[in-house]
Amino acid sequence: MKKLKIGTRGSALALKQAEMTEAALAVAFPGLEVERVIITTTGDRRTDVALSEVAKVEGVWDKGVFIKELEIALETGEIDVAVHSLKDLPTVLEEEFVLAGVLERAPVRDAFIGKISWNDLGEGSLVGTSSARRAQQLIDLKPGLEVCDLRGNVPTRLRKLAESQTMDGIMLAEAGLRRLGYSVGNVLEIEGVALQVHCLPEKEFYPAAGQGAVGFEIRSDDSESRDIISALNHQKTWDRVTAERGFLELLSAGCNTPVGVWCEISEGLVTMGARVYPETGGKPTRAEVSAPLAEAAQLLFQELS
């Protein structure tokens, strides 16, 4: 292959992840020409409704709101590889597509960015997020807290918080903050406003399956692209996200199901924990297991069933 066409969304974070992909390809295949194709997805276009409602309004299945147009571009040959934030990619793909590899994972934690501290959150506090998983955990862990819908890319959300007269904070992924060069120390200054940053341990605030990982989707029959992407694949990350996504598939969880899951692997033994909230709200079911990689997802699912 003389040229590899990679497709990406146009947000600042998506473009940074495309840059990371291009850098990895340049190291592995110095003579390969790489073309970047920027594609606007349904989720990018429909910022006028809550993220949880986009799929219903547009008739897009599961988390396809951020991948539909990328898959169309794959299918037509406009691109050879779709670069995704892996947590946006459904666990079950149509047969003509396959997840072929992942880059090394960034930190998986969620971060609270606020005008007040994480410890001061509580009765009457207002936090912005578009994630059902984050919203339910916030309500569960901080009784009396209220959540409002917040859309936009990372810089937009930070700006909205700085300008807001009502929001006390927002939730973002630590990985996105780091990749975009934001400080994840104690204080982050946005438009002259000092915001406190608190990265929450994954066993306290459970992340999304695949959070912090960049995944590569290709056509199932594209052996050339598969060979190229396999050279970029980070095996330890692959094992962890495979276990997490396997659990999510068994759970038949969609984008509106508030599910958090963390995973550790040591000497072939997988330790996984999950927290699953009812879609209508309320207390979660939770479980934790330790097992060989091939069995962990199934055992965790059984514990929760």
Image (cartoon, helix red, strand yellow):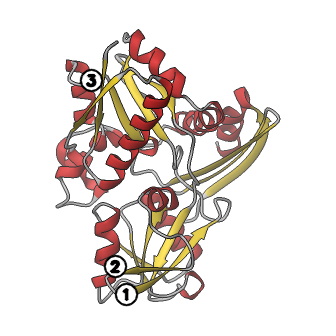
**15 relative to 229, above or below:** below
Residue drawn 72% across and 30% down? Answer: 293
Residue drawn 45% across and 62% down? Answer: 177
Query: Given contact means CB atoms under 8 Å apart, are the residues at marks 2 and 1 in contact?
Result: yes
The residue that label 3 is drawn on is 74
Mark 3 burial class by Cα count in 10 Å: few <14, some 14-19, many 20+: many
Q: Nearer the viewer, residue 249 or 183?
A: 183
Mark 2 to mark 1 CA distance (whole Å): 9 Å
The residue that label 1 is drawn on is 193
The residue that label 2 is drawn on is 161
Circle 1 sits in a helix, a strand or a loop, which is it? Answer: strand
**98 relative to 291, above or below:** above
Mark 2 burial class by Cα count in 10 Å: few <14, some 14-19, many 20+: many
Q: Is residue 25 left or right of residue 9?
A: right
Q: Position of residue 257 (x, y in %)?
A: 45, 50
Circle 2 sits in a helix, a strand or a loop, which is it? Answer: helix
Q: Quadrant of residue 4?
A: top left
Q: Nearer the viewer, residue 191 or 268?
A: 191
Mark 3 to mark 2 CA distance (whole Å): 36 Å
Q: Nearer the viewer, residue 61 or 174?
A: 174
Front position among marks 2 and 1: 1
Residue drawn 64% across and 32% down? Answer: 239
Q: Is residue 56 visible?
A: yes
> Looking at numbered disc 3 in the image, what kind of residue is underneath it?
Leu
Q: Position of residue 23 (x, y in %)?
A: 43, 37
- The first of marks 2 and 1 along the sequence is 2
Q: Nearer the viewer, residue 65 or 62?
A: 65
| The C terminus sits in image quarter | top right
